[in-house]
Amino acid sequence: MKPKLFLLDGFSLIFRSYWAFINNPVRNPEGQNVSAVYGFFSTMISLIDKHKPENFAVVLDSPVPTFRHIMYPEYKANRDKAPDDLHDQVPIIKEFLGVLGMDILASDGYEADDLMACAAKKGSAEGFNSFIISADKDLMQTVTKDIHMLRPEKGEYLDIGPEQVIEKMGVRADQIVDYLSLIGDASDNIPGVRGIGPKTAVTLLQKYETLDGIYENIESCTKGQIQKLSDNRGNAYLSKKLIVLNYDKEQGIKPSDYSLKNLDLSLLIPLFQKHGMNRLIGRVQKITGIDKDNNGDPNGPNSGKGVYSTVFTLSKLDEWVALIKKNKWFALDIETDNIDPMKASPVGFSLSVSSGRACYIPLIAGGQTYLDENEVKMRIIDITGDNDLKLIGHNFKYDYKVLKKWGVNVTNLAFDTMVASWILDTGTNNYGMDSLADSLLNYSTIKYKDIVPKESLFPDIDLEIAAPYAAEDADITYRFYELFKKDLKLRKLEGVFYDLEMPLVPILGDIEFNGIKLDTASLNKFGLELKVKLAGLQDKIYIECGKEFNINSTKQLQEVLFIERKLQPVKKTKTGYSTDSSVLEILSKEDIVPEMILNYRMLMKLKSTYIDALPGYVNSETGRVHTNLNQTGTATGRLSSRDPNLQNIPIRSEEGRKIRESFRAEPGCSLLSADYSQIELVVLAHLSEDESLKKAFISGNDVHSETGSLIFDKPLSEITKDDRRIAKTINFGVMYGMSSFRLGRDLGIPRSKAEEFISSYFLKYSSIRTFMDRIIEEAEKTGKVRTLMGRERFIPGINSRNKTEKSGAERMAVNTPIQGSAADIVKLVMIKLINKIRDLNLKAKMILQVHDEVIFEVPDSELDVLKKLVKEEMENVVSLSIPLRTSIETGKNWGDFH
């Protein structure tokens, strides 16, 4: 069997790899986009492993113009300039190839296609089976029985020989040049014969064999073909000159020199580690046979399975406590008997003081009691309350609440690896230990579902199974810490992590632990009122429609709206015409029934989401609802709420207020709400330095009325409610990149009018447009944006060629510094307020955070003190070019506010 020579079209693979990850780029620890590097070497390694070629070369284009550019200046002139973050990856790829000793073939004045054709032909003459690895159909002209293409299609590389060229193109390989001369090539800006498409080209070449043959027999063609061929004869032959490959460099190429005999892929491991490409490390280890447990640095993040022990005696536990006090930094993880921290009790603890080493301290396992709970608790109190020690955890807010319920107050949490992983990449959806270990450490963890049967709990399983699983959690947490602390420093994210997000973890834990009292009797009473209201609304709908039907049935609603009431459908789905809320809002301008359906749905949602569901969230021991404030749930830094979601209870509707009334203060206490006024617009004014918007705030007048006065060119005294409504919609819409179409729909005005409003807005607030353009340009260059406090967000799709994707990315880029900076300010003030409350030894508790609002439960005797304290701290927490304003309200229930 002949040896194989592989010739890889380098830039073709580099570009395809970059764009393949455009919506979720691969990034190294410095935050640099390395998608092209990752995709290039992932593909190259796969090709070498699967096909095992004896010889291999990477072929690259030269930046020097070729004869084709001189002959035809428009050649490839239609191509967009490659993004900067793609160009920046080429030197990295060359560095990697250099370390491998891999041959790079490039020559000034020649394209990679020319060089691959020369090398393939020379290789064939030297006894090789040559394979050109490229997506470029031009290269099909080189295909012979000894020269094939490997062409990427649908995730795999197809072997293209002479027969496959005919199957795919309809012509032989030796006819490809003439075929492309006829149809042209839009990607290279080669003109071809205007009006001749692939089918006609195939028909003509099957009949007349060559381009010359076609023109020699042009009179035998159809009238239309004669006209097109005659008008474009010059372009056809020009195209042929551009398409035919140049073999001039054949003499200088030596395929036999491109041997892989001494290839050592393991040389890439340190480079992959540097750029955080741990999946590729695993593949290289597998291919080369390197033992994962011994692949270099024994303390590195890929050092394999750890050494774990089970602590059976207090003396052994004391040895671990001594190790912790010597090392200062330690990882702690808790195993419990319930996923709900407000119901859970510890059944064991795991500790680690270095990567690859951990222990498990069992209290209960397999139905058997091990170490004495009180003795263990004393030692846990010792290591979690010593501020000279630094505790590391993963999603430690859960453990914090479990320990608090157990009687242990943690004071030395220093590093949460889940929070760190989120800070480093806010766009990832999964920050769980198993997922991160797989993607970042190339480590497969023991899975909970594999050791705990469905109907069992962790304390039910035997110790010999429980101990390695639990100890591994602490070990992996410590490994994450060693990895992330370097990355945070490298990316200059230490400030936002250590000063903002880490102090917030225990504060959020306390908020959740405190909970908020729910008066279920009051809620149930309103539920009965709402039930009557829904029944009445249902009857009105039936009367209006002249029949009874299932309002919740999409099919029946379609029939009522579009057949019986003959309303014009707005959009179609797989099951017929859409009846979603956006459609009903449009239809409600023509007919009363869609408006009634919207109201019915709103009330039904309130009933199912809150009135029926909230009582089930009341903790039987505390009588309070303990929501979960998700710190890593959004890319902008905003907190989100779940189980239950208390942030989405409607603010302005009477029904929403009634639900909020059920959340009450304990006897002798009041609720205090502190809400930032228009904080996102304030941040926008500060970041954009727009004097008109700043003036609107500094004046003390209503900012939306001020905006209305500017865009409608009216005195402030003449601004109507409708003017203000439009101005408010534009003010907030600008931050979210609202289009004229969306603005027109929201305001119920023609798109042309909405365009006028937006143009007028940016005319008056010109610095805002400049700011937005600057942010987008920065995102295009770096792939990311930053908030005031240094939080980073990568912007996938910012350089996408898809207009819809790019527009969405631009909106994300503009909104993030505004909404993210506002979120940072709210978090910072939460920290400062809690510190002040502790310093003053007040009994007031922070019990909820809803976007720009913080809610406290306060003894009535402390109300005046807290009002003054909160206002002062919130309005002076950061120094902006315009003042922050705070609204403070108090009441006996949440419904008393706003």
Image (spheres, rainbow, N blue to C red):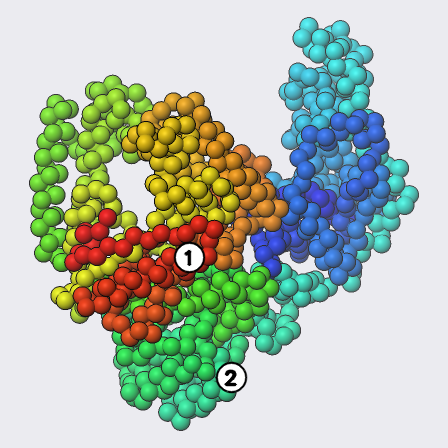
Is 514 situated above or below 259? below
**Few, some or many C-alpha atoms within 10 Å of disc 2 (few <14, some 14-19, many ≥20)?**
few
Relative placement, left or right, of 645 versus 99 is left
Residue drawn at point x = 60 percent, y = 40 percent: 153
Residue drawn at point x = 40 percent, y = 94 percent: 315
Is 872 situated above or below 716? below
N-terminal of the pair, mark 2 or mark 1, is 2
**Few, some or many C-alpha atoms within 10 Å of disc 1 (few <14, some 14-19, many ≥20)?**
many
Observer-nearest residue: 309 or 384? 384
Residue drawn at point x = 42 percent, y = 74 percent: 413
Task: Identify residue for label 2.
Answer: 327
Task: Identify residue for label 1.
Answer: 825
Relative placement, left or right, of 277 versus 12 is left
Relative placement, left or right, of 286 versus 189 is left
Residue drawn at point x = 34 percent, y = 49 percent: 677
Q: Quadrant of residue 709?
A: top left
Residue lying furthest bottom in this view?
A: 315
Point out which mark residue 408 bears. none
Instruction: Give the spatial CA distance, label 2 vs label 1.
Output: 35 Å
Q: Quadrant of residue 653?
A: top left
Residue 225 x/y as whole percent: 69, 11
